[in-house]
Image: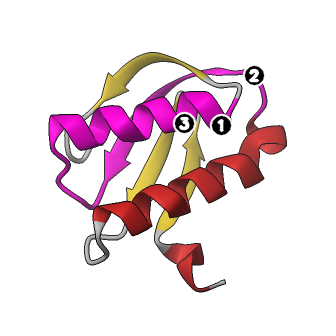
Amino acid sequence: KLMNNYVILKGKKDRLVIHLNSEVDFLTLRDSLVEKVREARNFIGNVQLAIEFSNRILSELEENVLIDLIKLNSDMYFLKVDLKKKIR
């Protein structure tokens, strides 16, 4: 599928880093995220994680949309949402 690398999920020990393509429009990104999270659902399981978006500046509204979609399409629940750019 073409959309497959617009969103890359990377698990770190205490967080899920969601690498977002910076070129595509938000709707495409949103659809790709939903697809990725569904694919990873069984793999990730019922966990408590911090979440961090990387590689793309999101508005607060966009962030909330993506977070809601992750909650709807996975069994994850979030400790906190880490919206800062790079973390060491």
Q: Which residues are magenta?
A: 45-74
For the point 41% across and 41% down, the residue is 66
Mark closest to the chain's N terminus, 2 or 3: 2
- Asked if marks 1 and 3 touch (Cβ < 8 Å), the reply is yes
Question: The residue under label 3 is which amino acid type?
Answer: Ile
- Asked if marks 1 and 2 touch (Cβ < 8 Å), the reply is no
Question: The residue under label 2 is which amino acid type?
Answer: Asn
- The residue at which mark 2 appears reads as 46
| Spot occupied by residue 68 in the image (x, y as percentages of width and height) | 46, 30
For the point 24% across and 59% down, the residue is 56
- Classify residue 35 as left or right of residue 57: right
Mark closest to the chain's N terminus, 1 or 2: 2
Q: CA distance from mark 1 to mark 2?
A: 12 Å
Question: The residue under label 1 is which amino acid type?
Answer: Asn
Q: Residue furthest right?
A: 42
| Spot occupied by residue 18 in the image (x, y as percentages of width and height) | 45, 50
Q: Secondary structure at mark 2?
A: loop
Q: Secondary structure at mark 1?
A: helix
- The residue at which mark 3 appears reads as 70
Q: Nearer the viewer, residue 20 or 32?
A: 32
Q: Nearer the viewer, mark 2 or mark 3?
A: 3
Number of residues whose C-alpha sits closer than 10 Å to that of mark 3, classed few (under 14), some (14–19) or many (20 or more): many
For the point 35% across and 70% down, the residue is 21
- Classify residue 84 as left or right of residue 21: left
- Classify residue 66 as left or right of residue 49: left
| Spot occupied by residue 61 in the image (x, y as percentages of width and height) | 21, 36
Q: Residue furthest top?
A: 79
Give above or below for 79 relative to 70: above
- The residue at which mark 1 appears reads as 73
Q: Secondary structure at mark 3?
A: helix
Q: CA distance from mark 1 to mark 3?
A: 5 Å
